[in-house]
Amino acid sequence: MSEAGEATRARIEAAALRLFVEQGVDATGIRDIAAAVGLSDGALYRHYPSKDELVWRLFREGFEGLAEELEHLAATERRASRRIEAMVRGFCALYDADSLLFRFLLLVQHGQLQRVKPGMANPVESVRAVIARGMKEGEIASADPDLVTAMVMGLILQTATFKVYGRIAKPMTALAPSLAEACRRILGPGSREKAGGPRKIKA
Amino acid sequence: MSEAGEATRARIEAAALRLFVEQGVDATGIRDIAAAVGLSDGALYRHYPSKDELVWRLFREGFEGLAEELEHLAATERRASRRIEAMVRGFCALYDADSLLFRFLLLVQHGQLQRVKPGMANPVESVRAVIARGMKEGEIASADPDLVTAMVMGLILQTATFKVYGRIAKPMTALAPSLAEACRRILGPGSREKAGGPRKIKA
Amino acid sequence: MSEAGEATRARIEAAALRLFVEQGVDATGIRDIAAAVGLSDGALYRHYPSKDELVWRLFREGFEGLAEELEHLAATERRASRRIEAMVRGFCALYDADSLLFRFLLLVQHGQLQRVKPGMANPVESVRAVIARGMKEGEIASADPDLVTAMVMGLILQTATFKVYGRIAKPMTALAPSLAEACRRILGPGSREKAGGPRKIKA
Amino acid sequence: MSEAGEATRARIEAAALRLFVEQGVDATGIRDIAAAVGLSDGALYRHYPSKDELVWRLFREGFEGLAEELEHLAATERRASRRIEAMVRGFCALYDADSLLFRFLLLVQHGQLQRVKPGMANPVESVRAVIARGMKEGEIASADPDLVTAMVMGLILQTATFKVYGRIAKPMTALAPSLAEACRRILGPGSREKAGGPRKIKA
DNA sequence: CATGAATGAGGGTTCATTCAT
DNA sequence: TATGAATGAACCCTCATTCAT
């Protein structure tokens, strides 16, 4: 009972994710998903109360899962620069392992972000927390943490986006060192670093 | 006729842009736009052959207009680093002047980018061209130009996105110096620069 | 414009009323109505925002129209017994002229009555008002006006219902004198009437 | 099995009756009923072959049960006027004891009456038989028995309906004497009664 | 007996688009 | 040009019913 239900649910999620990414959410009908899974339309409603809810759950799982993974990654390191690097590498590995999920996240974020509640695990907050802490502890140059977070995330996400559109062919994992180095430069050395490095970004 | 037609068309575009950004493209009906302009539904078809076409024209105008503006900006400077800075400042100024347009571009890009033909003016190509040329001429550290383009653009675009969601309050113009500085760091010094700067990004 | 719209609306109402009575409201689809009018399904929504609203408007028009007619009828007479008689005769005439409307009212009342707002014209209130006034002015035997209203209305409505089911063949108009006489008996003589008549109903 | 089956069936009927009255038959799904009883949807089909059948059996049981009760009541008395009074009192007592059943009967009658076959016990026929016999035996004024039946029944049913809608607060039992008195007046004295009473209704 | 996943027809409704006026 | 009635396909969803477990 639970077994068959679970399996069906997983197949629905996989099919929905793929179709949403391939055709867009609005262009993908509940019937398309059902047909892809080999089910009738009505059957989907045993597993999800509505299409909106299906989209939201897919988004939420990926969104929160990513945040938790990033936080886990950050927790494995003690210095800010190493934390960032771990997160960058981790993200790249996740992307290569399941790019569909990230393309979906990228695709629907504008519609779903407003449903994200303050208490939820949130990758943006995860990154921001590492950066803000690094600034406070003097390992990262002081600056507006939101701006720096935006820049660091944009770096990564736009690279992933370029991959989606075929502008970049290499796997993200191969680019991880370069992305990490770019992050390092943007973050700059904190006050506790030895002098002589590049000046910080203030903003 | 042309005069009144032009004016009507401008009002349609303005209303459509606003509604598309506020509610999403699919959630905005032809009737919503017509009502916002004070027209009946059928009347819109005097000006645009279809909703898809309206979206595409809006996208294309903004997309090509941005590319042309960026190229114009780049042409005002002779050194790569100055070109980049001019483009960053120019983009920020444009964003502050008409953020709706950029939000629209950000919103619909995933659906429209595939319609962009090679010959069209393209902001990504504009940025990439400046970067590639800077590399060839030794003003920018050699690296994969696509990767560097992605990183530079991501920097800017994600910051703009953060603004959209209220994470960042300052106008983009105020952030332009910081964004330009970040770009400079990512691009690194070329082989013709004096030694002692940070190492280049290779990727 | 208005002309064609009005005409279509009238045809929709007539078809809907007939189908609702023939098959029941829930068993009648929007498509059935559209087909009966020779329209496509979507076209109905230019005239009515929803099926529920169509039902409600039909009910409301009939309900309020009946109330107004009854009040008009009552206003033509000065003595309570004559008022009642006028209302009974009037109702019977209306029924014979448009039995579909009354069958519809009878059919959907249980679902629509809760939407009736206190301020609305209401046939029950109209009848009750005449009865209550007759009691106050001593022309009708004092009793619980709600109970008496129920009895008087039930008299009439159940007769109409019997007609619907074919138990009674004669037109309501032919039965009006008998119905009026029955009402008279139920209402009884007021304190101002001469003695010797039947005793009043107290309840 | 029979024992548990019987109990389950009773719980299903009680839940169905309540939900049908509260929400309407069409608005009440098989799932609502199942959930109210603590069963799964499919399980109901062990007890009833279809929803229509469930509705019909509920109606039939109440309809025939009422007829039988009325006939039993009528059989306890020998004079027509006493018979009517007994039926009125009996109906009122039944209503107060199980108003849900009568509300259900009132609610679904328009849809179910056409399934009533001539041979079935039928409260309308029961009442009509008493009235017709009373006329034949000279205890009730001669008139169209169907009309008189309609009037008598309407008297009672509309009062019950008013109770449903809160227009009348007292229990039906308390109103029984008034209702009986009203019936007496409508029926009038037969030819065997002493002179001087009110004239008969002819119709 | 009971479960709950699945069916599939049908529900009301929306919407881009057309066209007579 | 502009209107708004009309189209018709497609949408998401509900629901009575069936059936393997």
Image (cartoon, coloured by chain):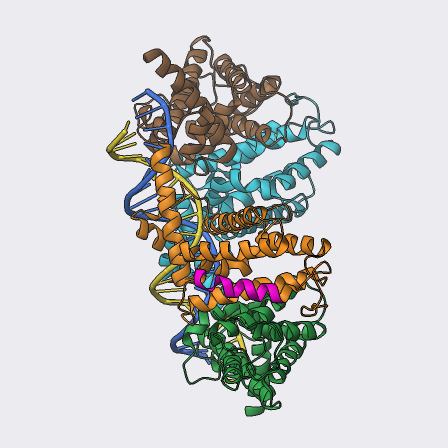
Chain colours: A cyan, B brown, C orange, D green, E yellow, F blue
Q: Main secondary structure of the magenta part?
A: helix
Q: Which of these two is toward me, C192 or A99?
A: C192
- The residue closer to the viewer here, D174 or C152, is C152
Left or right: residue C193 versus residue B93 is right
Q: Is residue E8 left or right of residue D34?
A: left
Residue D173: in magenta span: no
Foreground pick, B157 / C180: C180
**F18 left or right of D178 in image:** left
Q: Nearer the viewer, residue D75 or D123?
A: D75
Residue A176 position in % (x across, y down)? 51, 39
Considering only vertical position in the picture, is A108 above or below B122? below
Residue B148 horizontal/vertical position (percent): 47, 28
Residue at 64% over, 80% down: D85
Q: Quadrant of the N terminus of chain D?
A: bottom right
Magenta residues span: C173-185
The quarter holding residue A84 reads top right
